[in-house]
Amino acid sequence: MPLNELWFVLIAVLFTGFFFLEGFDFGVGMATLLLPRSDGEKRILINSIGPFWDANEVWLITAAGAMFAAFPHWYATLFSGYYVLLTFLLLALIFRGVAFEFRGKVDKQSWRKMWDAAIVIGSAVPPLLFGLLFASMIKGVPIGPDMEMTAGFTDIVNGYSIAGGVTLVGLCLLHGFTFITLRVEGEMRVQARRWAERLLPIVAGLLALFTGWTFVVTDLFEHRGNMLLPLVILGSIVCVLAAIFLRKGREGWAFGMTGSLIVLTFVSMFVGLAPRLMVSSIQSAYALTIQNAASSEYTLKVMTVVAAALLPFVLAYQAWSYFIFHKRITNKDHLEY
Amino acid sequence: MDIVDLARLQFALTTVLHFVFVPISIGLSLLIAIMETLYVVKKNELYKKMARFWGNFLLINFAVGIVTGILQEFQFGMNWSDFSRFVGDVFGAPLAIEALLAFFLESTFIGLWVFGWERLSKRVHLACMWLVSIGTMLSALWILAANSFMQRPVGYVINNGRAEMTDIMALLTNGQLLWEFPHTLFAAFATGAFLVTGISAWKLVRKQEVAFFTSSFKIGITVALISSLAIAQFGHGQAQYLVETQPMKMAASEGLWETSDDPAAWTVIASINPEDQTNSYELKIPYILSFLSYSKFSGAVPGMKDLQAEYEQTYGPGNYIPPVRTTFWSFRIMIASGSMMIVLGLYGAYLAIRRKLGNPNKLFMRLMFAAIALPFIGNTAGWVMTEVGRQPWTVFGLLRTEDSVSLNVSSGQLLFSVISFTTVYLLLLCLTAYLFARVARKGTIEEHQERDKDDPFDQGDDSIALK
């Protein structure tokens, strides 16, 4: 496999991994608005992602770093082209990150309320914006012969991209609920499952709508229909399985299925895109590809060696940290602030 | 302001503010690792209490350091896309390796440390903090490797209109990095150490928890003194390296318009007039600049006018003189704060050895508290000198700042992001300072009683803990 192809796959894996992992902690963040009936329960929910959210976010940082190193033009075009969107994304992530740490530090109702709001907004806005970004990216944005992207508002925000954003928010919320069923005890566990059961058909509908829309407005199916069709069928099966596992109370499996939905969504996107990185709406020849946007052979080689040496350790200790904190959180002990 | 000015303003503000938090994380995680090591080795609960108390500061700070760090990574692509295209092949790799090698390590093991007090054995728990500490240092190493390339490009060829990497080991053995890394690293240790020492001094003046804060003071002052001396040593080396590789930056930081006499005198202060390229007032000490530049009391140091002529020959017409006043004064501010840190470190260590902390010299202890600010002033001034002194280049000799900016971003968009990020960063700075003050005021006694009332992330071990 040529190294630029390998790095395209690795970056796709990093983004997919990011949405699989941070997907559920975005979902839990949003769920703090919907689920807890008391401050103690809210605290349990926030604790359920306590040891993880930070490392989950590093998947995004690594994905962006890998883009910079392996495909500098992709990084430069995308980040400058989506300037305003990324500004809002960063603001949301900033407030979310400090909110977890700050909310309990001052024992005042108003203080906690403020950071609770930051957690909810900071968890809902990023998937929405990422949905806008990726959907508009596969539909095509104005990229000229010099690789500069000059997008207007409607190039980024339109019916299709909004559908993408809403779908991703729904996916994360659903994934968050199934994560909660795994991590807590008692009434919240029951409620989270109920929420997941009710949300599943809506998310399935959104996915169907978005897939159909993708068929119409993008060339992804034209381009890779033979590979995308099986993925779509697989996605439908996963939806059905998720419903079955939720009903049977097989929480681990249900979590696996909601995660699979996120994975299938992003895998489909990257499969439909390849070997392009960004589609140009001006002329297909202006698209960024894994050839014209890549780093030199030497840099890719160095990066490959480094990644091959480090990734096994990174995956191992992350898995270990999930193993260490695999037990459910309970409210047996006092929880009042 | 045009987009170059706005992009520079945003980079300067966000980087300086980000670099308030980074050295605290590097410094405090080392100190806490030392404290917890003492706990495991000496089996004295006092040190465990110490690791936990100072851990509160680390965690508050860590969160802010991370969220402001994401912006740093995104900013190159958002505001400096032509820079990213030009150097991405070289510059991107250290950033990606930083994430893979350092950020995962820090973020995973800080989670394990916070929530793992009861779930992990003592030694494994201690190893977690050391891994966090090593992670922060590795992060500094790789980001400074990238920065060193901007100061002194090595291990590349220009190909297809961009810099392409030819030798990663050249990046890691860059002479610039070999001075810059230890200099910055010890500055970060000193930042954490002066924070611990300063807060301890403040508590000792008030006679609160004397035993606890005496011990903290001792650990803090030891690290503070060693670090301050090391900063000076590596700083001296870096200055000499500067004379060789970036003489213009050195000349600007000395306000040296004409090439100096041999031996060269050191300008303590001067009134600089960049318009007519003269200094109207100077206070000089003979021989010292030669010593600073070459470690001997002879040798002339090239001045800006001669260098300008030389650079015009090499790089074509243009102005190659950086903002002289800024470079000159930031250099002096850095040296002044470093020197004060050494003096305070020495006297503090003397007091600790003479066991005079229980009945402290109030004036000195208050000075020690105020000295928390010194490393921050020094760090900021140091970065201003390094980055402003490199102008008009982003990558020295290869890429000018004006050619680095994103051309497809409008000044309106930039203005919006400058205003929003600056506001948010200043807010974060205030909130962090406020929370630091709260934690410091509370001390450790109340902390124990109010543990259940505290942040779930900090106190995950006893009540709510993931059981």
Image: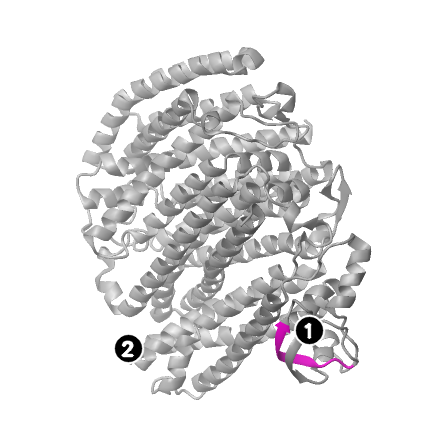
Label 2: chain letter: B
Horizontal and vertical percent position of residue A110: 21, 51
Same chain shared by disc 1 and disc 2? yes
The answer to which of B4 and A162 lies nearer the viewer is: B4
The residue shown at (35%, 75%) is B213
Reading the image, the residue beneath label 1 is: B278
Outermost residue toward the front in this view = B276
Q: Quadrant of residue B172?
A: bottom right
Amino acid type assigned to the residue bearing label 2 in the image: Gln
Residues packed near mark 1 inside 10 Å, few (<14), some (14 to 19) or many (20 plus):
some
- Does residue A36 lie above or below B284 as drawn? above
Give the magenta range. B263-272
Reading the image, the residue beneath label 2 is: B208
SS at mark 2? loop
Q: Would residue A71 be visible to someone looking at this image? A: no
Do the numbered discs 1 and 2 sit on residues whose CB atoms are within 8 Å? no
Q: Would residue B435 be visible to someone looking at this image? A: yes
Horizontal and vertical percent position of residue A77: 58, 34
SS at mark 1? strand
- Does residue A77 lie above or below B17 as drawn? above
Main SS class of the magenta portion in the image: strand
Residues packed near mark 2 inside 10 Å, few (<14), some (14 to 19) or many (20 plus):
some
Residue B267: say if magenta. yes
Nearest to the eye among marks 1 and 2: give it.
1
The residue shown at (34%, 35%) is A124
Outermost residue toward the right in this view = B313
- Report the label total: 2
Label 1: chain letter: B
Residue B60: say if magenta. no
The answer to which of B261 and A110 lies nearer the viewer is: B261
